[in-house]
Amino acid sequence: MSNPQVVVHRDGDLLAAAAAARLVTRMVDAQAARGYASVVLTGGRTGTAVLEHLNRNGARDAVDWSRVDLYWGDERFLPSGHPERNETQARAALLDHVALDPSRVHVMEPSDGKFGDDPEAAASAYADLLASVSRPEDHGDVPSFDVCMLGVGEEGHVASVFPASPAVYEKERTVVAVRNCPKPPPTRVSLTLSSVRCAQEVWLMTTGEGKAAAVAMALTGTGEVQLPAAGATGRRRTLWLLDTAAASKVPALFKPPLA
Ligand SMILES: O=C(O)[C@H](O)[C@@H](O)[C@H](O)[C@H](O)COP(=O)(O)O
């Protein structure tokens, strides 16, 4: 488990642009080292803005998109193509504009997919997929993703893991169905925190005053049951990418001295 690092940017747009540039570099380095890059995408405004900026980044095609494995941290359990699905928004923002290998874009099943309106079956199938692509060096049923990107909710949720929810207590399964989610839409499929923690690097990216309390609590010892973002740590790196508003309650010890 890695200690959190905090990087603060002037505003949300600069945060998204800087995170996109960081992601390009991380993916290029992963491909140089191992021949492929694996990234977990997140829904939400910040996560989608990062993909939009990545699509506009001049270094975008330094990435060999045919050797990228994409996953989702969570997905809204809606029909395929629904505008509220994270997949739909990611495709519009980036995926439809780069030469990905479709077989390496690992979508969580929609509610009109092969399992119909059964989110538990969709979750179980995604867990099986993760297990099938895990390598011996991953030491488990979840790949050691190069980067797992996460947005953060005002009450501290990440992916679709909410405070004191069944998902936050899950210790066995790697992917779960989430019902009665406090953030609409109510039914989702989500990685559990233990799956998030398989990533080499976890990037928590959020903006705005409304997130400042959750960010500060996560960084100052609140437990993951009450504040799931506190449990989102990477094997090698846990990076909080914030704008000044979301960082406004972060203790000085986490912020580099102003230049
Ligand atoms: O499917 C989702 O809704 C997201 O995965 C969710 O975890 C999101 O990232 C946070 O709610 C932050 O969302 P914003 O970035 O829009 O604040």
Image: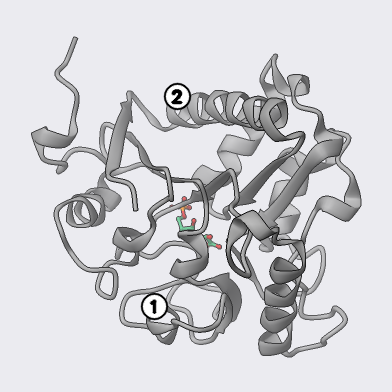
Q: Residue 112, which numbered label?
A: none
Q: Position of residue 223 (x, y in %)?
A: 22, 68
Most foreground residue, 142 or 101: 142
Q: Is residue 127 left or right of residue 238?
A: right
| Crowd rating for badge 1 (residues with CA inside 10 Å; few <14, some 14–19, many 20+) | many
Q: Is residue 45 left or right of residue 53?
A: left
Residue identifier under label 1: 168
Residue at x 52% of width, y 52% of height: 199
Residue identifier under label 2: 14
Q: Secondary structure at mark 2?
A: helix
Q: Quadrant of the C terminus?
A: top left
Callout 1, which amino acid?
Answer: Val
Q: Is residue 29 above or below residue 157?
A: above
Q: Position of residue 40 (x, y in %)?
A: 61, 51
Quadrant in the picture for residue 53: top right
- Mark 1 and 2 residues: CB-CB less than 8 Å, in contact? no
Q: Position of residue 27 (x, y in %)?
A: 65, 31
Q: Position of residue 185 (x, y in %)?
A: 57, 74
Residue at x 46% of width, y 68% of height: 194
